[in-house]
Amino acid sequence: MESELHSIGELARASGLGVGTLRYYDGAEVLTPAWVDPQTGYRWYRPGQLADARLLARLRRVGLPLASIRAVLGAAPGSGDARRVLDAHLRRLEDGLTDARRELSLIRAMTDQREQPMTTGPTDPTELRLTVPAEGLATALDAVRFAVGGDPEVPALAGVLFEPDGPVLRLVATDRYRMALAEVPAEGGPTGHPVAGTIVPTPLVDALRALLGPGAAEVSLTLGGGRVRAEAGGHRVEGAALDFDYPDHRALTRLEPEHRITLPAAELRTAVEAGATRTLPSGPHGAECEVTVLTLTGDGRLAVATDPAAEDFRLAVNRDFLLDALGAGRPEQLVLELGGPIAPLAIRTPGRAGTFSVLMPVRLPELPELPEPHEPAERS
């Protein structure tokens, strides 16, 4: 049999993949050998698997994630599934390039400001005045407030990022275990020059939210210069912004959903509150907390699992974090995007593309993480 097969070393040399990398993809069930010698453990591959190995090498070079590589190699001929996966990855790369250009433009503006500190005008990002609808800002704050960080060792997360972006003001909050984003229309935003986001500290966020009562129609926001000022309904709140760099939320919210489930928010909340949980160390600093395991039924519906089989789709998340996300902004309908057991869970509100939250998954003990590729010796 060995004479008809390629050894792992031969496949490695012919494909450009390392021996350890081929072992990794065997463990990930992406490219499994045709035969493994039960005595020596040597892996042997069919001649036809060389084409898959060479394709796999190219997919790795363009940064395709593991789940997408599996989808491309497993796509049925003529289905168009592989092309759809590749097109989606190309869009993500293009979005990443757009983000990089935006950041570099902002960096140039900031370095120009350092070199010419007395210069004012369109390249001076020190202050910006926006006008936003009070009700819209209140809704946006309610949608992100739950995700604000409280860890004193990570002070940059102890507030909400206010990020002007053309005709909208984007709000972002995260504590590293979850992230929430919301957008509200804004007048006076930047049109031809970049403006850095402002981190509004939590006490000032809460004071601003209290300002947005029934009598307020619009809010005048002044951001920049290390200060934040908000005026609405004849009242004003003001304070210092947090002087830290905020995490790149765009990199964290480029998701690859494999399933999109639409359902009433109240239905899911009831199921989570009444459903089974597991106690795992998934909270901040490794603290124990209750975890909800979501699964998909045979007809594609989302359910809270009681004891899902190992082969079932499973996604585990912190129960309290999930309930917080379901209640944020009080939506009636939800769209849940699931990418797999180790992919973040996105919770969206239909009709509000810029408003959603993301929960980091909890790894179940019976789903161990695959080791990183390595290069131990094996027969070549």
Image (spheres, rainbow, N blue to C red):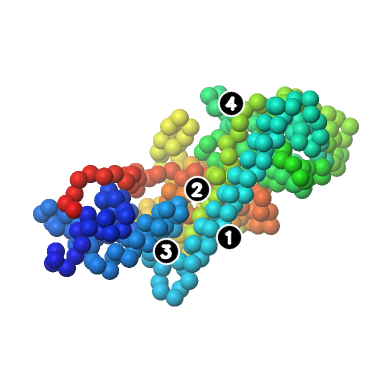
Task: Say which amino acid is labelled 1.
Answer: Thr
Q: Which residue is mark 1?
A: 262
Question: Disc 3 versus disc 4: distance between alpha carbons?
Answer: 42 Å
Task: Say which amino acid is labelled 2.
Answer: Pro
| Residue appearing at x 33%, y 44% in the figure | 372
Q: Which residue is mark 4?
A: 155
How far from the left and from the top, in percent, is residue 364? 38, 45
Looking at the image, the residue that sits furthest to the right is: 234
Q: Which residue is mark 2?
A: 344
| Residue appearing at x 54%, y 53% in the figure | 93
Mark 3 vs mark 4: in front: 3
Residue 162 visible at all: no
How far from the left and from the top, in percent, is residue 223? 76, 32
Tell me the SS state at disc 4. helix
Question: Disc 1 versus disc 3: distance between alpha carbons?
Answer: 26 Å
In this image, 2 relative to 290: left or right?
A: left
Mark 2 vs mark 1: in front: 2
In this image, 312 relative to 91: left or right?
A: left
The numbered mark, 2 or 1, whose residue comes first in the sequence reads 1
Mark 2 crowd level (few <14, some 14–19, many ≥20, 10 Å Cα): many
| Residue appearing at x 86%, y 39% in the figure | 215
How far from the left and from the top, in percent, is residue 349? 64, 53
Residue 348 visible at all: yes
Question: Disc 1 versus disc 4: distance between alpha carbons?
Answer: 36 Å
Question: Disc 2 versus disc 4: distance between alpha carbons?
Answer: 24 Å
The numbered mark, 3 or 4, whose residue comes first in the sequence reads 3
Task: Say which amino acid is labelled 4.
Answer: Pro
Mark 2 vs mark 3: in front: 3
Q: Which residue is mark 3?
A: 72
| Residue appearing at x 82%, y 42% in the figure | 188
